[in-house]
Amino acid sequence: MFKLNEILTFEYESAYDFAYDLQMKKNYSNPKIYIANGDLKKRWYVYFSYRNQKTGRLKRVTPFYGDAHKYKTKEDRLFVLSVYRKKILELLKLGYNPFEDNQELYQKQKNKKSEQPVKTTVETKQEITPIAEPAPKIIKPTGKTIAEAFEFALSIKKNVVGERTYEGYISRLKSLKKYLDDNYPVIKYAEQLTKSIIVQYLNAVLLKTSARSRNNTRIALSSLFQMLEDNEIIPTNFIKNIPVLKAIPERNKTYTKEIQEQIFEYLEKKDPILLLYIKFISYNFLRPIEVNRLKVGDINLEEKTISFKAKNSPLKTKIIPDILIQDLPDLTGLKKENPLFTPDKFGGEWTTSEKNKRDYFSKRFKRVVKEHFNLGKDHGLYSFRHTYITKLYRKLAENSSPFEAKSKLMFITGHSTMVALEKYLRDIDAELPEDYSKYLKTH
C-alpha cells in the first residue's frame, strides 16, 4: 500500500503543477503548520483532518514531519514546512485519501507526467527547427509575497474600519516593510515571517518612541495578521501571543480657571476661528477629531442640535447649549456638505483627510496658544474637554449625590456606560474628597 508520506516524499522531490476540480466536495481540512510556539527543541509539523467515510466526521491524520527537524533556524524550518503544506493541499485536491491505498491514483499521475512530450534538442534532430517557447512557469516556494499579503490585508480592512484607523494601518505596514527590507532582505514571503522577527521590530519601535506606541503598533499588526491567518495566507497569527508592555498612560491636564479665561480672551482678538473650535470641545464636550468631522449640515439651529460621528457610535446627536448657540456664525447660504471649520473661514471648501485636519489644528493651537502662554506638552486641545467636564461635574455634585450627578453628566457627555464615565472622572481627577483634616487631628 502506498502511504501518503511515501507519495509526498516523491512529489516533494519532483514537484509539478496539478490540475484539480475546484468544485470537488472537500473531505479534508486545509493543512496547517504547528510551530510549537517557536521552540526549535520541539517537533514542528504539518497537520490536517480527513473525513471518515463511516462516521462522516473529520478525523485528525498522523502529522507529517518530513525533514523539518534538520533545519536549525525558525525561518528555514517554517520555509520547508510551508512547501510541505502546499504540496499536501495539492495532493488532497487531487483526491488522495490518507486512509486508503492510493497506488492506482499515484501511478496514473506518474504516467501522465512520463507521457508529456520531451522537447527535442537541435543536437539530436537537426532537421527540426526549434520553436520559441515562453519561459517556464516558476513555482513559488510559498504563497503571497510580503508586499502582496500586506496589500491584501489593507484591501479588506479598508471596507471595515474608519479612515483614521485605515491610515494608521498603512503607516504601520509601511514602517514594518522598510524594517524588513533593511534587516531581512532575503525574506520575501509572508509565510517566512516569524514571531522573533516581529518582536525585534517592536523593540525597534519601543526604542524610537514609547511603550504605548509599541503596544498600539502590536495591536494594529495583530489585527492585520489575523486577517492573513483567516484567509490562510500565513499559518498562524503569532503576534497575539506577544505580550503587552506596561506603559505609563499619557494624560492632558485640565486648565486652571485663570489660564482658561486668559486663553479665551486672547483668542477673541487673535484667532476667532480657533476659539470657536475650542468652544465646541469645551461646551459640547466633543473630541477634537469629532469637531474636525463637523459639516455645516450637521448643525440644526431650529432644534438646537448637532449630529456627528462619535468615537463609540456611527452617528450621535447632542443638543447645542445656548452658551454656544450665541457664538455660532451665520451659516445661511453655506453649502451643507462643506466642513464647518477650515483654516481661514467657517463653512469653506477644504478637501483633505481627517488626519491632516487634526494635525493642522493641533499645530495651529501650539503656534498660537501654547507658545504664547508657555504651556507644556501635557496641555493641549483635549485639556479643554477635561476642564469643562470637571467643572460641570463638580457643579452638579453640589446639590446632588455622586450617583445622581454622574447620571446627569453621563447623559450630557455621551459616555456609553457608568463604568466608563467613572473611570474617565478618576483619570482626570474630577472627583475629589472633602477636606479630611479633622480626621488627622490629635486630641
Image (cartoon, rainbow, N blue to C red):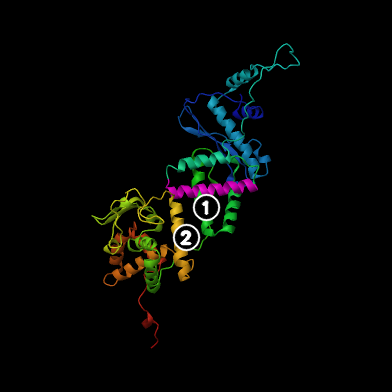
Task: Report, in whole angstroms, how far the alpha carbon at label 2 lies from the one at label 1.
Answer: 24 Å
293 w.r.t. 425: above or below: above
Q: Is the C-beta separation of discs 2 and 1 under 8 Å?
A: no
Which quarter of the rendering shows the C terminus? bottom left
Q: Which residue is pictured at 39% across the width and 69% down the height?
A: 266
**Residue to which mark 1 is pinned:** 217
**What kind of element bears circle 2?**
helix
Give SS at disc 1.
helix
Q: Amino acid at mark 2?
A: Lys
The circle drawn on residue 363 is 2
Residue 398 image offset from top left, x and y in percent: 29, 72
Left or right position of 311 against 140: left
Q: Quadrant of residue 67?
A: top right
The amino acid type found where label 1 is placed reads Thr
Q: Residues within 10 Å of mark 2 (few under 14, many from 20)?
A: few
Residue 308 point in image, percent of width and height: 34, 52
Tell me which numbered mark, 2 or 1, is placed earlier along the sequence: 1
Numbered range of the magenta stretch: 161-183
Main SS of the magenta segment? helix
Q: Residue at x 64, y 35 (%)?
A: 66
From the viewer's perspective, tell me whether residue 55 is left or right of residue 403: right
Q: Is residue 58 left or right of residue 34?
A: left
**Residue 254 among those drawn in magenta:** no
Q: Is residue 229 visible?
A: no
Query: Residue at the spot x=49%, y=42% of the render?
Result: 154
In this view, the residue in front, 291 or 22, is: 291
Camera-side residue of 111 and 434: 434
Judge whether 193 appears above or below 210 on screen. above
Instruction: Quadrant for residue 399, please give it.
Output: bottom left
Please state the horizontal and vertical placement of residue 95, each as a whole percent of the image.
Answer: 53, 24
Give the camera-side residue of 311 and 199.
311
- In magenta segment, residue 176: yes
